[in-house]
Amino acid sequence: MIVNTSNYGVYDNQEIDIYTLKNKHGVEVKITNYGATITSIVVPNSKGELQNIACGFDTLEGYFGKEYLENAPYFGSTVGRYCAQIKDAKFVLNEKEYPLTANCGTNNLHGGVKGFDKRVWNAAPLASSLKMTLFSEDLEEGFPGNVEVSVEFTLTDANELKIQYQGVPDQDTPLSLTNHTYFNLDAFSNTIESHHVQVNTSKRQALDATGAGTGEIVDVTNKSDDLTCAQRIGDVHQKMGDGFEHFYVFDTTAQELQELAHIKSEASGRALTVYSEEPCMLLYTGKYTSNALRRENGEQYGKYMGFCCETHRYQNGPNIENSPNSVTKSGKEYKSTTIFKFSW
């Protein structure tokens, strides 16, 4: 794997860099240390044509445009300290209530107003990977404990983008990091509704009216959102009358990598297979993404133009009894791996 570094812009009087990972098959991933954010992923199609399949921008300024800030899609970013929504922006831990920043109605979303996606990470290119680290202070956005987290990106010659998260807090604290890349296997020439998706579970989290997990696990067997057999995304959208924002739940008691999902485009021949140790994956088909968003070269984003496979702990986990590993104990290691494998 080749790692190259170049300047990406300036934020808060700091020089921001962008790093390019490239393998022998021409797969190329660009990542900036602003938010540990994936800005593009170039993958061949079945004809060998190299095209970008990830929402993002070629300049740092793109992440500060009016439309982007108002829509807040979190393109490609590393999300934390706890991703997804926490009900009423609070939780009780060790008999103490911790109020959080409410930035999604009355709930806390993706770590708060200035979560990990809006921080500048320290980056270190290694022999065969790129490692970024970030120090999060006690009570930052309301979360207890100091913790230094890291995310390591590795692009292999097997066309796998491996993302490894790690951290050790000095107090018990909720920790759940994810990557928020939006993919379009047709390189944005069409919506993702023509893609076929399979998700290897028949369970998902139930959500309340605010969008927070209730603790109930729903069996979707033979329902419209049962994806255990591959379905065309647009067909399921039509059946549901809406796009996906589904938190699918997996049996990961052994905490071993398993295949969670497989998405394929017949038009381009590209496919993405998702592996993770995490007990939950949000399948999101960009139903709230603004049509005003596009890359500097005109590449069009918007509703149903990209899908996310966000692997993480339970949504609203700190408020759900017995949710697996939603809290990392003081001095214990938080560790998680997700792999995006590309084929064509």
Image: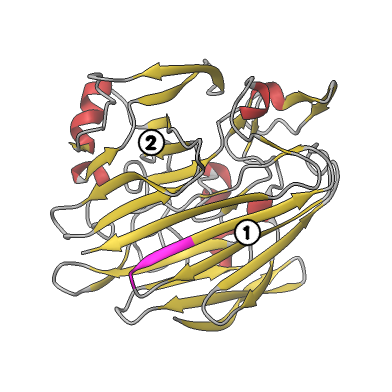
Residue 201 in picture, x, y percent from top left: 34, 31
> Which quadrant of the structure image shows residue 234?
top left
Pointer 1 or 2: first along the chain: 1
Work out whether residue 332 or residue 299 is closer to the camera in this orientation and state it: 332
Q: Quadrant of the C terminus?
A: bottom left
Residue 181 in picture, x, y percent from top left: 45, 53
Residue 276 in picture, x, y percent from top left: 45, 48
Q: Is residue 159 magenta?
A: yes
Residue 39 in picture, x, y percent from top left: 48, 64
Q: Quadrant of the N terminus?
A: bottom left
Residue at screen point 30% across, 69% down: 43
Left or right: where 105 falls relative to 12: left
For residue 145, above or below residue 205: below
Badge number at residue 65: none
Determine whether the residue tagged by mark 1 lies in a helix, strand or loop.
loop
For residue 134, above or below residue 231: below
**What residue type is disc 1 on?**
Gly
Q: Is residue 255 magenta?
A: no
**What residue type is disc 2 on?**
Lys
| Tag 1 residue | 35
Determine whether the residue tagged by mark 2 lies in a helix, strand or loop.
loop
Q: Which residues are magenta?
A: 158-162
Q: Residues within 10 Å of mark 2 (few under 14, many from 20)?
A: some
Left or right: where 80 falls relative to 191: right
Residue at screen point 40% across, 17% down: 218
| Tag 2 residue | 287
Q: Is residue 291 visible?
A: no
Residue at screen point 32% across, 48% down: 305
